[in-house]
Amino acid sequence: MDVDLLVKNVIWKDKKAFLLVNQGTVVDLTFSLPRVNCKKEIDASGLVLLPSLIDAHVHLRDPGFEYKEDICSGLLAAVGGGFGLVMAMANTKPVNDQASVCEYMLEKAKTYYPLGPVLAPIGALTKDLAGQEMAALGELAQAGCVAFSNDGLPVLDTELFRRCVEYASDLGKVVIDHCEDPFLAKDGLVNEGKLSSFLGLKGIPSVAESLQVARDILLAGYLDIPIHLAHISCRESVELIYFAKKKGIQITAETCPHYLWLTQDECAHYNTLAKVNPPLRTKDDTLALFQALREGIIDILVTDHAPHAEFEKNVPFGEAPNGISGLDTALSLSLKLLTKDFTWSDLVCLWGKRPAQIFNLAFSELAPGDNANFILVDPDYPWKVTKKTMLSKGKNNPWIGTTLEGKVMYHFLQGELVYSCR
Amino acid sequence: MQWRHKHLLDVDQLSKEEIIHIFGLAKNFQEINQRPVKKVPTLKGKSIILFFAEPSTRTKTSFDIAGKRLSADTFSLAKTSSSLTKGESLKDTVLTLEAMRPDCIVIRHWQSGAAQFVSSQIDCSVINAGDGWHAHPTQALLDGFVLYSLWQTLEQKKILIVGDIAHSRVARSDIKLFSILGAKVRLCAPRTLLPFDISAWPVEVFHDLKQACVGVDAIICLRLQLERQEKGLLPDLREYSQRYCVTFEHLNLAQKNVKIMHPGPMNRGIEIDSSIADCKDSLVLDQVQAGVAVRMAILYLFILGTN
């Protein structure tokens, strides 16, 4: 048999395996050395094979804020981080609330990365994200939006939100809700608690999130329509989602690596790199989130990649914008989740299989005939997070200066090498 | 004493010994302030920039006089006359100021953490003259100095702080300072004006002013910002004063000769009864007087101390 590519000695499901690729698709993935003639061969000893992953929540800042990030740099960070598809939020300038903006994004991504990573735009739920009028959801869906969200600016008017959710469901699209009561969270800068009191900063209470989580759960149950909850950060929300799932309500939820590995203490000394919305919470909240991920209460991991320019974060805490630039470090950080009860395939579920199910996206699991979209990960590779090693334009990452273990060594999309660490 | 601090950001960076050392110096400077010629050449040739991005009369004047009495050259910059109103970032403003080679920048800013931010950007000494709700170390040091001068110790003294603790940098720094000096701190305020979770603070919390006053040695009244009512934290000022205005009735529950303090500016009749503000046990003007001496001590130590 003739094939384009043989990846040999790779680790797949804890065993040594061989991946055969021809014309951009997987021919076979076997545990014994196949007899083939290959144009190219890679010895991947010690590297773990994973399908190319999905990040269902990023901000690429393009159009409008290209100084923070653009589609080109954002997709580069995605591909280096192991992601073959990213879902980009609508808070660009202009807002992605019309087909022309959506088409611009898709066009630019295709031009720079014809093989992928794929940019999957999320359309604005309301016009200009203003929370006043429903956006042209049909037009946006037709143009290529895969979901809708008012991320960053939660819809205050529950009646309008309900109608948006109903309308989106006709189009077969899920609404992603940023759960935050804007009154309770107003002017807040960090989690409300001992630290906010000590630092003299206005707090954001966890109930500002869980209250809206409860609203969305009740609404999803009443309408019998799915709603996806963005960046869950606290225990009370987890408890409500557990209740919802037990009742069979169509609720799905995501959290981010920073809510698992960091607490509000990161903001002591007014560290603006740890300023993010929802805010980093307490140790107890991180424990609840860990458990929720292991038990499937929280469905997926996302980065909420929110790049900013350096000068924007180099200001007093209260003036700094919210957000962490997360595409570069997300996979390395989530490797820390692995235990004997939480395997590589659980990880692939969180970062690929589940988001593909929720948002109805194509996802290659490397079965014969699937697109050859895969990454080769060195799980022990130590690398220092620096401005140079980060591929995103946004260097606002609280792990900067630290050493993480595990990195994507190669990323193939449609059988072609699109990223190599070495 | 070998002085190890370059910046004064908050009182919790200081040890008890260092605080007492500041008090000792302040006492000497207070004597200078009583002389007919109130000037010494200690900081001759040093320049101090007073950068007040938020309105202030007493703190700014106090620093200005303190600097001048030590023969330093002081330069004032207010927000309205600074480039901050033209959209310049705080970083660029202070880098510009630093390029003029001052020895010290005294900063007042509405953002909590602003003084720490500035100290991380520049090389000269930074003195925090109040940052947001976070800290006001020189006010705490002068409050402590006034009581220490009177009592010679703060150990086991009961000090009550009444009013808007949540939004008060004075309260935060006072609590830290009094605790370092061994005093027992009580707070009294409606829950809406207390920080959300202060279980970690070394304080005893009261919501009833009469109960809070029993047996205390000093009462510090905080200014009620009138905008708190607009934000829905209070019904109205009349109700607030009925519940939290310190009057003679309260003094009778406290220790004999209980001392009354206020960081100013006062709302007479709202947080403090007018006649109490002027009574013999009121230390309000002693605080202002002590402010100059304490700030002289601070400027001296933080500018010359680390050389």
Image: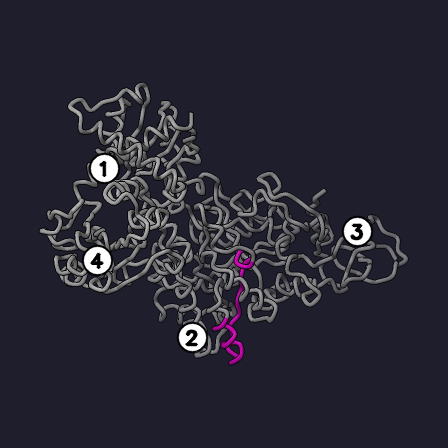
The image shows residue A271 at horizontal and vertical percentages of: 46, 46
Q: Residue B290 carries which label?
A: 1
Q: Disc 1 vs disc 3: which is toward the camera?
A: 1
**Magenta segment, which residues?**
A239-260
Q: Which of marks 4 and 1 is nearer the N terminus?
A: 4
Residue type highlighted by circle 3: Ala
Q: Which chain carries label 1?
A: B
Q: Which mark is residue A348?
A: none
Q: Which chain carries label 4?
A: B
Does the residue at mark 3 contact the one at mark 2 (Cβ under 8 Å)? no
| Mark 1 closeness class: few <14, some 14–19, many ≥20 residues within 10 Å | many
Q: Disc 2 vs disc 4: which is toward the camera?
A: 4
The image shows residue A72 at horizontal and vertical percentages of: 57, 45
The residue at which mark 3 appears reads as A44
| Mark 2 closeness class: few <14, some 14–19, many ≥20 residues within 10 Å | many
* Front-lying residue, B220 or B73: B220
The residue at which mark 4 appears reads as B230
The residue at which mark 2 appears reads as A219
Q: Disc 3 vs disc 4: which is toward the camera?
A: 4
Residue type highlighted by circle 1: Ala
Report, in whole angstroms, how far the alpha carbon at label 2 lies from the one at label 1. Answer: 61 Å
Which residue is at 66% across, 57% downward?
A: A335
Residue type highlighted by circle 4: Glu
